[in-house]
Image (cartoon, rainbow, N blue to C red):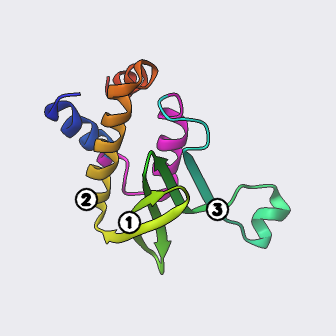
Amino acid sequence: MAEADVELLAAALRRDSTDLNLYAQVLSANLADSLPAGAVRVGRRRSLADRMAGREGCVAELDVALGEQRLTLRLDRGRVVGEVLHVVRGIVLSRREVELDEWVDALARSLARAAASNARAREALERFLT
């Protein structure tokens, strides 16, 4: 995937990043075809009212695992906090807190790497960009 395509993907991802609920929906639904099963995990916070009404609750954390890189977004006191982790065999070797723009760029680059090695991922990403 060319550098311009990575930047286009990052812009498309950034477009929906203002609302964590919407962002989780975009990543878990629209990119599900391009990622391995279980690559996107959505953590939700459910109040008693949510449970009684059968609602899923609001998104509290979004976790995307791509190879040795894991990217997390979580709500911390009403603020979205991004982290980029380097994980090898289930062990976190490094953890770095980043701004949302840097998180989106890291996600776009990881998705581009996945698409470069997987035709199915490439097709799904091309559908997402159009």
SS class, disc 3 = strand
Quote the CA–CA distance across marks 3 and 2. 24 Å
Rendered location of residue 106, percent (x, y): 29, 51
Give the spatial CA distance, label 3 vs label 1: 16 Å
Sequence order check: which comes first, mark 3 or mark 1? 3
Residue wearing tag 3: 44
Is mark 2 in CB contact (under 8 Å) with mark 1? yes
Task: State the image quarter where residue 71 is shown.
Answer: bottom left
Q: Position of residue 64 (x, y in %)?
A: 48, 51
Q: Three-letter amino acid code at disc 3?
A: Arg
Q: Is residue 104 above or below residue 116?
A: below
Q: Main secondary structure of the magenta part?
A: helix
Residue 76 percent across, percent down from the top left: 47, 77
Q: Quadrant of the C terminus?
A: top left
Q: Position of residue 52 (x, y in %)?
A: 85, 63
Residue depth check, mark 3 versus mark 1: number of the one nearer the observer: 1
Residue, disc 2: 102
Q: Which mark is residue 82?
A: 1
Q: Which label sits in the foreground, 3 or 2?
A: 2
User: In the structure shown, which secondary structural element does the residue marked by tag 1 occupy?
Assistant: strand
Q: Residues within 10 Å of mark 2 (few under 14, many from 20)?
A: some
Q: Which residues are magenta?
A: 14-33
Q: Is residue 50 above or below residue 113?
A: below
The answer to whether 26 is drawn above or below residue 120 in the figure is below
Q: Residue at x 48, y 81 (%)?
A: 77
Q: What residue is drawn where x is 34% and y is 70%?
A: 96
Q: Amino acid at mark 2?
A: Glu
- Crowd class of label 3 (few under 14; some 14 to 19; many from 20; radius 10 Å): some
Foreground residue among 12 and 42: 42
Direction from residue 32 to residue 117 in the image, left or right: left
